[in-house]
Image (cartoon, helix red, strand yellow):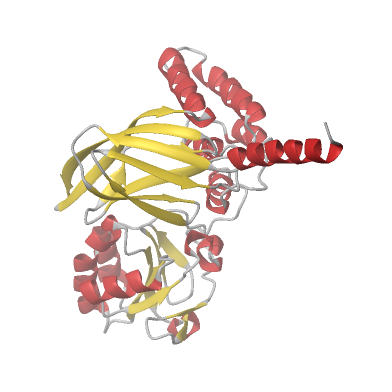
Amino acid sequence: MNNFYFFLIISFVMSAQEQKINSFFLKGSFKSDYSGYLYMSYNNQKDSCFVINNNFTFRGKLKTQSALASFSIKGKTTAMQSDFYIENKNITVSLSTKESVINDYVITFISVDEIIGTVTSQIQKDFNLFIIKHKNAKNYYGKLYKKVNEIVINNPENTYIFDLLCDLSNDNKLEKNELLKIYKKLNKVNANPSSIKMIEHNLNITHKKKVGDDFVDFQLPNQNNIIISTNQFKGKWFFLDFWSSSCLPCRKQFPSLKIIYKDFKLKNFEIIAISLDQNKQKWIQALEIETPSWINLIETKGVLGKIPVKYGIFSIPSNFLINPQGKIVAKNIEISVLVNFLTKNSAE
């Protein structure tokens, strides 16, 4: 065979293999009848397709070994029943839906009942079987550390492993030092920064603002793009509230906060709400609906912004109460407790 043509054939085969490795084709179906648009989000990307005869397909490319993905349905408030990960492979999934009413909101839960074609799904199944088999064993925690360590050694870049460690690091029954040893074996080059932040936060690698610490001033824009500095509120009591438009528990607190603000705003008290919305328009829309009259600021980098990182914010709602001397006197205080606290102290 002519060397030139042989080279072309080899190049074509290698190119085809590379294309197959660096892309995914997801074929799915609904167990129940559904016709309409379905959305899939992953790695800050959002794709859509029209479901026909309960069947749908998605194509794309991942720059990482795996990615956490989620489905949503047009016109519905949706939530995933369990974590679902995609890879650059041919993937087959089966979905089912169930509607529930939570805090007066109708939420459509989407469940991925079957996944075929990914390494991650096999790791998940294996780990879940391990938990079922050993959860009641006397030496359960020792077995758990060993199992997770094996998973990390064999899959140091897998997104699911980072999320698994996030969950485990949040369990107060587990030894932080043992988890830290395992965490150091991960390859963090392509990891989700928010996952790293949460793990390091839980394992006490990063500093967390706590009661008794000094408040650190910052500047952020309000809804009119005017930069507001917290320095101007020195000498006041103020409630620092981290939230987002998509956080239903956050918004459910607004009516109570409005009452508190009305009762105490003339008593040396202010509320500063910091939205972690990365989509500014959604934040504006939420403000128009909720109509809060206190100070509203936004950090469009979400939990990875300088202020959330500085204050160790990795979940919402989160809050801090600052006294006139600039000290943090309460953290994640309940609204009912906040009322009692201000009643006793706001006149100081």
Seen at 22% across and 53% down, the residue is 76
Q: Is residue 298 above or below residue 233?
A: above
Does 68 sit left or right of 339 as displayed?
right
Name the quadrant of the C terminus.
bottom left
Could you say where residue 342 lies in the image, as x and y percent from the top left?
A: 29, 69
Q: Is residue 168 above or below residue 70?
A: above
Could you say where residue 41 lies in the image, as x and y percent from the top left?
A: 41, 51
Q: Nearer the viewer, residue 275 or 172?
A: 275
Let me know if residue 215 appears in the view: yes
Seen at 51% across and 43% down, the residue is 67
Does 188 sit left or right of 164 as displayed?
right
Q: Nearer the viewer, residue 342 or 117?
A: 117
Could you say where residue 184 lies in the image, as x and y percent from the top left?
A: 68, 38
The residue sitting at the front extreme is 1
Q: Nearer the viewer, residue 138 or 327?
A: 138
Let me know if residue 103 appears in the view: no
Residue 162, by quadrant, is top right
Labels in figure, total: 0
Seen at 68% across and 42% down, the residue is 15
Q: Nearer the viewer, residue 187 or 253?
A: 187
Residue 339, by quadrant, is bottom left
Could you say where residue 4 lies in the image, as x and y percent from the top left?
A: 83, 41
Name the quadrant of the N terminus.
top right
